[in-house]
Amino acid sequence: MPAPSGRRAAPTANPYLVCAAAWAVPGGGHLWLGRYQKGLTLLVVLPLMFAFGLWIQGRIFPFQFSDLLVGLAAIADLGIGVPYVLAKLAGAGAGNVIAITYEYGNTYVIVAGLLNMLAVLDAFDIAVGRK
Amino acid sequence: MDTTSHLGLLLIFSAFVSIAFAVLMRDEPREQLMFGAKLFGTFVGSAVLLGWLLYPLPL
């Protein structure tokens, strides 16, 4: 069946591999699917937002589900992919709870991860031909 | 920009989120620009408005 008008034909890449790439490298799924403008923008904006959050003393939350919000924040942080791993390897993300920008930094780091999760979903939609 | 200023951090946050949403939700660069600008204005405008609405309330 032909794709509805206004939609592009579904790319041939495996959608799940595209999702993995999109998670690991922000914008990676879009770049794989040939959406270079979107991919490059996400590749710059999301890691920059994550790094800015760490720079202003934000914290990478631990996976401690005894406090549900801490556990959920940890999942959101992980959403940014490879930058999360690099930050952990570099020893960044300890956070400084007495810094005036601590909560702001947490918000930046969490939202960067959540936005990358949205980018993963968008890449999936493109890969299966919905967009 | 002062990174301890609430307004400065609000502007930077709004810019990041607006760009990401505009890129994800619109396909054409012109549409992205318009949508991103509207989002940014809404973020900043609503924050300033809410700030003034809350201003008379005691802490």
Image (spheres, coloured by chain):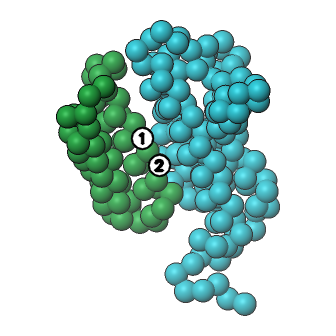
Q: Position of residue B28 (x, y in %)?
A: 41, 66
**Residue carrying label 2:** B20
Whether A119 is drawn above or below A101: the answer is below
Residue A74 can be seen in this image: no
Whether A23 is drawn above or below A72: the answer is below
Q: Quadrant of the C terminus of chain A?
A: bottom right
**Residue carrying label 1:** B16
Circle 1 Cα neighbour tier, 10 Å, few/some/many (<14 / 14–19 / ≥20): many
**Residue in front for this viewpoint, B29 or B38:** B38
Give left or right: position of A86 versus A64: left
Q: Position of residue A14 (x, y in %)?
A: 79, 61
Give left or right: position of A58 versus A90: left
Q: At 72% from the left edge and 47% from the top edge, which residue is drawn?
A: A21
Visual hue assigned to chain B: green
Q: At 65% from the left edge and 33% from the top edge, which residue is drawn?
A: A69
Q: Quadrant of the N terminus of chain A?
A: bottom right
